[in-house]
Image: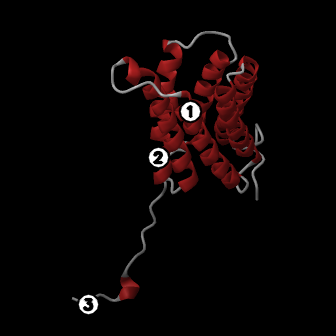
Amino acid sequence: MNQDITSVKIISVKDSIANPAPLGLMGFGMTTVLLNLHNAGFFALNTMILAMVIFYGGIAQIIAGVLEYKKDNTFGATAFVSYGSFWLTLVALILMPKAGAGEATSNLAMICYLVMWGLFTFCMFIGTLKISRALQIVFGSLTVLFFMLAIGDATGNAVIKTITGFEGIFCGFSAIYTAIAQILNEVYKKTVLPLGNVS
């Protein structure tokens, strides 16, 4: 049965999903700060860090990334699912050998792991040049962090590792700032904390 095309109504579906980016940024930021407090020498690697890595840095970020797919945000989806997976693989690298599931990662393999994440992050940083200054700081400092971690592992220099920890703390807090800014700006319907959006 033929139907007159002019009689077909176009139905628009309202996007009812909240912005998942603050959740992903907060999961990344808080976990990064805590891990790098350890890297800076404030306390030993412990279950508090591992729990944050698994549940907030890992699972919560992946959930945020899946929701970004629903928001049609390729950048956000790729970033949050990738970095959520980074945290989970990091825990696996620590715990799998202790559980007898494979050999411990060699120093060279760990350096390669960190360099690959640094390269990926640098590519994502290029994408932030079209988004906001706040995200440029997050991804720029994260790129530096991955390469500094790789250099620290390559040299075994304790001073470099400590400095890297403080750089990581800065990176984490920049992500926390970006998350809080998005939340408060949305709640108050005005710019409470600037993000430096690129037009």
The residue beneath circle 1 is 108
Instruction: Please give the name of the residue rendered at 40% of the width and 87% of the height, measured from the top-left corner.
Output: 6
- Residue denoted by label 3: 2
Which residue is at 33% across, 25% downward? 101
Left or right: residue 97 compared with residue 17? left
Amino acid on which disc 1 is placed:
Leu
> Disc 2 designates what residue?
67
Residue 180 shows in the view: no
Could you give the CA–CA distance between mark 3 and mark 1, rounded to whole angstroms? 67 Å
Q: Residues within 10 Å of mark 3 (few under 14, many from 20)?
A: few
Q: 43 above or below 115? A: above
Q: Is residue 29 left or right of residue 167?
A: left
Q: Position of residue 170 (x, y in %)?
A: 74, 28
Q: Label 1 neighbourhood size at 10 Å, few (<14), some (14-19), many (20+)? A: few
| Label 1 secondary element | helix
Q: What is the distance, in whole Å, between disc 2 and disc 3 at their CAs?
A: 39 Å
- In percent of width and height, residue 2 lies at 26, 90
Mark 3 or 1, which is nearer the eye? Answer: 1
Q: Nearer the viewer, mark 2 or mark 3?
A: 2
- Where, by quadrant of the figure, is residue 161 drawn? top right
Work out how far the residue at label 1 is from the one at label 2, CA to CA, in angstroms. 36 Å
